[in-house]
Amino acid sequence: MDSRPENAVNGLKPTISVYSEYLSNRISSCFPAAASYLSKFSNFYRGNSSGTSKRRRRKTCLPLPFPSSSPESSMVVCEASKVVGVLEDIMECIFLNMHYIQKNLEYWQSKAQGSNAKKAYFMICERGPYAFFNGTVQLISDCVGEGSGVQHTYCLASSYISERINFLSSLRYHLATFLAQIYMKVDKAGEELVKDPEKSLSSLLVDMNDLFLKLEASIGHFHAVRQQSSSVDDSYSFPLIFEKLPEVNQEGSQWTACEITDAINLIYQNMNRLNRYLASIVTIHRKPRRVTRYWIPYTCGIVGISICSLWLLRHSSLVGSSDIDNWIREAKESTVSFWNDHVEQPLISIRDDLFYTFRKRHKGAMEPEEVQLTADSLHRMLQAFTEQTKGDKAPPNATDQEMLEIVMMRYEKELMHPIQNLFGGELSRALLIQVQKLKLDIEEAMLELDQILRANEINFAILAALPAFFLSLLVIMLVRAWFKQDKKAEGRGRVARIQRRLLIVEVERKIMQLESYKDQGQEKDAQCMLGLALYYLDRLYCAVEGHARATGEWISLRQDIIDLAKPDLQTAHKLRITSRMERIYDCLLPLPIRQ
C-alpha cells in the first residue's frame, strides 16, 4: 500500500446521517459525471477540516471497555489514540444505524398489534395518493368480482407489515451480533494493550477487518434471500462488499506507521460502505414519512385554507370591501374590553383593598368607643343600685356580674308585688338596668359582626379577580408545559422518566435472554442479545448523563452502566445493579402519583 499523511487518518470519519449518505449515493447513480466531483469535494473538505479542528462526534456514547485503573493503561490508550478513535467511530456508526432501524421496527410492530380494520386503513389511506387510488380500485374490483375484497386487503396488509418486521429484525440481529463481537474483541484486547501495545494494535486492526468481512457474509446472504423472495417494489442498488487487508499486513508481527494508517483508512472505507448500504435498504423498508401518513388531513387542510383565502379575498380591501377592517376593529375593541373588565379592574380592586381596607376600619357602623361608653354607664348604674340597696358603699373591686346578681335578686323580690313596687319600689329601676345590659350585648355583637365584614372585604375583592387569576394560571401552565416538554428519554417530565425506566427493563430482559442462550449453547443468539443490551445501555447512557450530572450522581451511575456492559460479569450481579439503579438514582425514580 502507498503511504499517506497522518492527517488523512483524522480526516476520515463515518457518515453520521444515513440520509445524507443515501442522497449522495442516489445523486451519484443518477448523475455519474457528478460522482467524481462530489468525491473530490468531500475529500478536500475532510482533509482541510481535520488539520484545523477536531472531528465532530456525537454528544455522548457508551465508553469502550479499555482498562483505566492503572497509569500504564492510560499511556497505552494515548499512544493508540488513532485506533481508539477508529473503534469509537465504529461503535458510534453501529449505534446510530441500530437506532434508526429500531425506530422503524417499533413503528411496524405497533401497526402489527392493531386490528384488521386499522391495518386496512393504513394500506389504503396512509401510504400516499397513489396507494390510495390503487387500493380503492383493487378493493372495489375484488368486492365486485370475488366478494372477498376486505379479507384480501386484510391479508395484504398483514403480509406487508410482517415482511418489514422480519427484514428489520434480521438486520438488527446481524448488526447487534457485529456490535457484540467488536465489544468483546476490544474487551479482550484491553489487557493485551497494556502488556504488548505494538503487537496488540495490529492484531486488533486485523480482527476488526475480519469482523467486517463476517458482517458482509451474513448481510450479503440475507440480501440474496431478500432479492429472491421479497415483494418490495424497489430493489437494492448495490451489494455490500468490503475491502480486505492484504495478506502481507495480516502476517506481520509489527507494523509500520504507514501500514497502520492504511489499515485505518480501509476500515473507514468499509464503514462508509456499510452506512450507504444500510441507508439504501432501510429506506425501502422504513415507515412512511409524516407527510405520506397524513396526506389526507393535509390535503383537506390545504383545500380548507384555499377556500378561506378566497373568502377572505372577497371581503378584503383588494376587492373594495371593508369587512375585514371592521372585523379587526371589533376584535380589538372586544379584546380591550375583556382586558379591562376581567383583568385590569379586578387587579386594581385587589390592590386598593389591600392598601385601604385597614385604614377605613374606624368608619364602621359600630365603633369600640361607643361600646365602651355603654359599658361604663351600665357599671355606674349597677354600682349606684348596689349601694342604695345594701346601704353601704360597694367594694371597689366588685365586678359587673356580681352587682348584676344583686340587681336580679332585688328584681325577683320586687316582682312579688309588681303594681305596688312599680310606682313605689325599685322595679322600674331594675328593668331599666336590664335594658341597658341588653343594649350593651347588642352593641358588642354588632361590633364583632362589623369586624368580620371588614376582614372579608379582601376576600370579596379576590372573588372579583378570579377570572384574571384563572387566566394567569392557564398561561403559566402552558408556558411550563412548553419548557418542560418530554423529549423522549432525555426530557424532564413523567413520560421521560417512564422511558428511562423502560430502557432499564429492556436491559434486564436482554441480560436474562443472554444467560438463557448461553445455557442452551446458542452462541450466535447470545452475541445478539449482548449487542442489543449494549444498544439499550448506550441509549440509557445518553439519556441520563445530563440529569445525573445535575444531581451529582453521574460518576456512580456511569460506573454502573459500564459494569452492565461487561461481557464477563455474572448475570446475578448485573441484575442487582439494575435493581439498585431503579431504587437509588433520582433521574430513574418514578415521579410521585398525583392525588
Image (cartoon, helix red, strand yellow):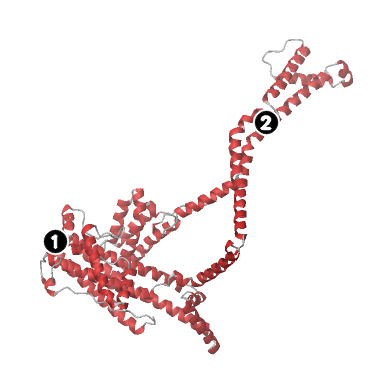
Q: Residue 227, how many percent across, how many down?
A: 33, 82
> Three-letter amino acid code at disc 1?
Pro
Vertical position of residue 418 compared to residue 116: above or below: above
Q: With 254 as the anchor, is 589 left or right in this view?
A: right
What label sits on residue 197 in the rendered view? 1
- Of residues 276 and 252, the one drawn nearer to the viewer in this rendering: 276
Residue 223, percent across and down? 31, 79
Q: For the residue labelled by badge 1, is the local secondary structure a helix, a strand or a loop? A: helix
Image-quadrant location for residue 92: bottom left
Q: Which mark is residue 444?
A: none
Q: Is residue 208 above or below residue 339?
A: below
Q: For marks 1 and 2, give the CA distance.
A: 93 Å
User: Which quadrant holds the N terminus?
Assistant: bottom left
Instruction: Indicate the position of residue 188 as horizontal and vertical percent values.
Output: 20, 64
Which residue is depicted at the point 61% across and 51% down? 333
> Quick check: can you spot residue 513?
no
x, y (%) of residue 496? 42, 58
Could you say which quadrant of the image residue 194 lies in?
A: bottom left
Of residue 438 and residue 499, the one placed in the foreground of this image is 499
Residue at x 30% of width, y 56% of height: 560
Amino acid type, residue under disc 2 in the picture: Glu
Residue that mark 2 sits on: 448
Q: Secondary structure at mark 2?
A: helix
> Residue at image x 58%, y 38%?
351
